[in-house]
Amino acid sequence: MHMRNLLFISMIVTMNLAYSQKSIKIAFYNTENFFDTIDGSNDDAEFLPSSKLKWNNEKYQEKKKHITEIITALNFPLIMGFCEIENKEVLSDLIASHKKLKRFDIVHYDSPDLRGIDVGFIYNKHLLKLLDSGNIRFTLPGDSEPRSRDIVWAKFAMKKDTIFAMVNHWPSRRTNDSEPKRIKAAESARLFIDSLLTKNPNTKIVFMGDLNDHPEDKAPSLISEKLTPMIVKSSGEFGGTHAYKQEWGILDHIMVSAGFSTGKISVIPNSGKINSFPFLMEEYKGFKQPKRTYVGEKYLGGYSDHLPVSIDLILK
């Protein structure tokens, strides 16, 4: 009888704890060329109605609908980072596309990227207060001036806690000599992280992005020396966020600081997830892979060549 009473009390305590806490996600997504159809000052010639891709309003609206579908499936994350966005306007269109997204606001800075693509955040302004934001700009080896994507950061207040979020899109792997460029991006991010942790070792930092490198590579390791990687092979059904020549790899990362283990907001351990919702996938020659928007000049009407990644937080 005594044991039954103990079990009953334990169940009540567990249920009360569950009801007193809420979980919510932070997420990141490489959108694969979320461009509008307007000829801007950046190099957007590839994504215009007159281009070979025939990027028109119908395709743009479908792309926006797809990204909204992903945000909905993730249950409207507290913060969601994006890369391969053309400008702030596409994010403005995105948050105007769904009634629940109207509670969100944007952090964005135009970058000097040669392709005209940026990174940015949307965040729930009903739950978070934006205290500050900025961009980290750096010059890559071999360049005379900055020509790559900025790292964008934001400082948020939530209850009595403060969260720093960073979104990245590091240089491409297209050439064999590209690693020093990603190391430069990593060093730039690491300097910012070090400055925060030196001031307060319990600072809550969430670092996210398409790093164009795998977890074991040198550049991401510069960050994982300071922060805990949340996206690993076991985080998803296929062991990766991106498939190249029918091989999966983790290019999209979320890492968090030790400060997330304390306070009113904490990260659920091992909650990192590579989200392979069925609507994101297709089968090609017997191999399951993300369904892309384009393959070459062929329009597939899919989502992206990357899968979204997320972590879960507990709000006490």
Image: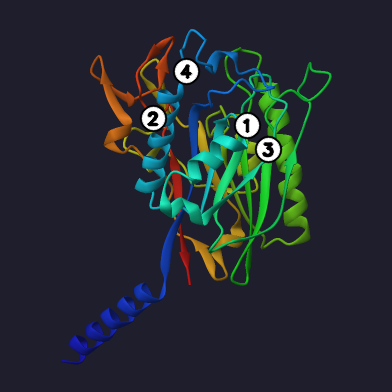
- Which of 136/8 is in front? 136
**Which residue lies under the disc numbered 3?**
151
**For the residue marked with disc 2, what is the amino acid?**
Glu
Q: Separation of disc 2 and disc 1 at Cα?
A: 20 Å
Q: Separation of disc 1 and disc 4 at Cα?
A: 19 Å
Q: Please say whether residue 76 is visible from this viewpoint.
A: no
**Which residue lies under the disc numbered 1?**
118
**Which residue lies under the disc numbered 4?**
55
**Which residue lies under the disc numbered 2?**
62
Secondary structure state at the residue bearing disc 3 = strand
Q: Nearer the viewer, mark 2 or mark 1?
A: 2
Disc 4 crowd rating (10 Å Cα; few below 14, some 14-19, many 20+) is many
Image coords of residue 36 (percent x, y): 53, 27
Q: Nearer the viewer, mark 4 or mark 3?
A: 4
**For the residue marked with disc 4, what is the amino acid?**
Trp
Sequence order check: which comes first, mark 4 or mark 3? 4
- The residue that appears at 52% across and 10% down in the rendered structure is 50
Secondary structure state at the residue bearing disc 1 = strand
**For the residue marked with disc 3, what is the amino acid?**
Ile
- The residue that appears at 38% across and 30% down in the rendered structure is 62
